[in-house]
Amino acid sequence: MSNMTLEQKHRLKRKIKTAMLTIVIFGIAIFYFSPILYMFLSAFKTEHQAVMPMLFFQPTLETIKLVLSDRNMFGYLKNSLFQVFFTTLVCLLLAIPASFALVFGKFRKKTTGESAYLWFITTILLPPVAVIIPLYTWYQKFNLIKSPLGLLIAYIGFHVPIVVWMLHSFFKDVPVSIIEASELDGCSRFRQLVSIALPLVRTGVISAGLLVAIFVWNEFFLAFNLTGNDTATLSVYMARFREQQGMFVAQLSASSMVAVLPAVILGWITQKSLVKGLTLGSVKG
């Protein structure tokens, strides 16, 4: 060490720090991933093997077949897919023109657009538990309890502000000169949105749609309180499965794996667009 130059010592220190930081990061990642890993491994175990955790075991598809043989599960899965698809679609149809209008709309007061945008932001902070009682009361009055339409309306109301918040920063990055030039050419507002602005914010639209789809797929509180046996989603099925069947760890893990896989596959397929959209959105905002 005494023969090493000062520059070599600095390089060695940087390498040691980098190695230690890498070990710490991998350790944290493994710690947070361990429950998911345990769930996936338990799905390929028998109930006896799952209750008595063991590292080495003979994998079996018996538990997965048992879970997939439950016809009720596919009903819950269908309800989840219905909510995810239509919530994402309607949220985008409402939030895209709303975001465009907040950025490029002409209001009597200059602060109207910013005030409306801040209103959207504040609604994001509202927790569902704060409105569940009045929401449940109104749903009872209009016969929307245990209706897929009722849950869909609630999901749209909670997720439209999120999409507006995300797309607002993307529309802000669209050059105003392009919009003004299109106005001189006689381009309508709808044409400006569809033909000019929307292609420029395509990445943001994809990212916002993916986030809404994931949020709805994983949502439990509203689905648990506003649905019945015929309209509940997959997340509710997971809770009821545990209550009805008891602590069958292997079956719970297998059903959880089935519920997690669509979101994981969707995220893996679209990870480039999702990361790019979120990164650009954070820089623009």
Image (cartoon, rainbow, N blue to C red):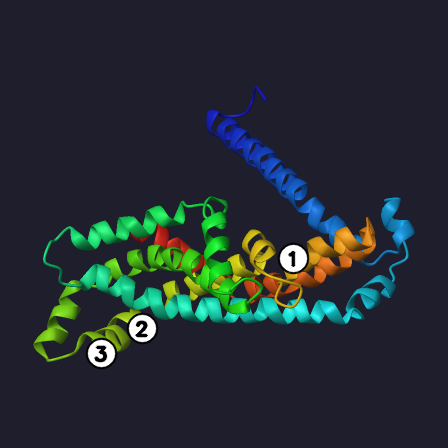
Of tags 3 and 2, which is closer to the observer? 3
Query: Label 1 belongs to which residue?
Result: 236
Query: Label 2 belongs to which residue?
Result: 199
Distance in Å between CA atoms under marks 3 and 2: 12 Å
- Secondary structure beneath disc 1? helix
For the residues bearing labels 3 and 2, Cβ distance under 8 angstroms: no
Rendered view: 221 above or below 139: above
Report the side of 229 relative to 170 (left or right): right
**Badge 1 or badge 2: first in the primary sequence:** 2
Q: Nearer the viewer, residue 69 or 6?
A: 69
**Badge 3 or badge 2: first in the primary sequence:** 3
**Image-quadrant location for residue 93:** bottom left
Report the side of 45 relative to 92 (left or right): right
Query: Label 3 belongs to which residue?
Result: 191
Write the residue at 53% across / 60% down. Answer: 216
Distance in Å between CA atoms under marks 3 and 1: 42 Å
Write the residue at 76% across / 49% down. Answer: 38
Of tags 3 and 1, which is closer to the observer? 1
**Type of amino acid at the residue the image marks with label 2:** Pro
Give the label on residue 253, or none: none
Q: Nearer the viewer, residue 33 or 112?
A: 112
Q: Position of residue 215 (x, y in %)?
A: 52, 57
Q: Position of residue 133 (x, y in %)?
A: 49, 48
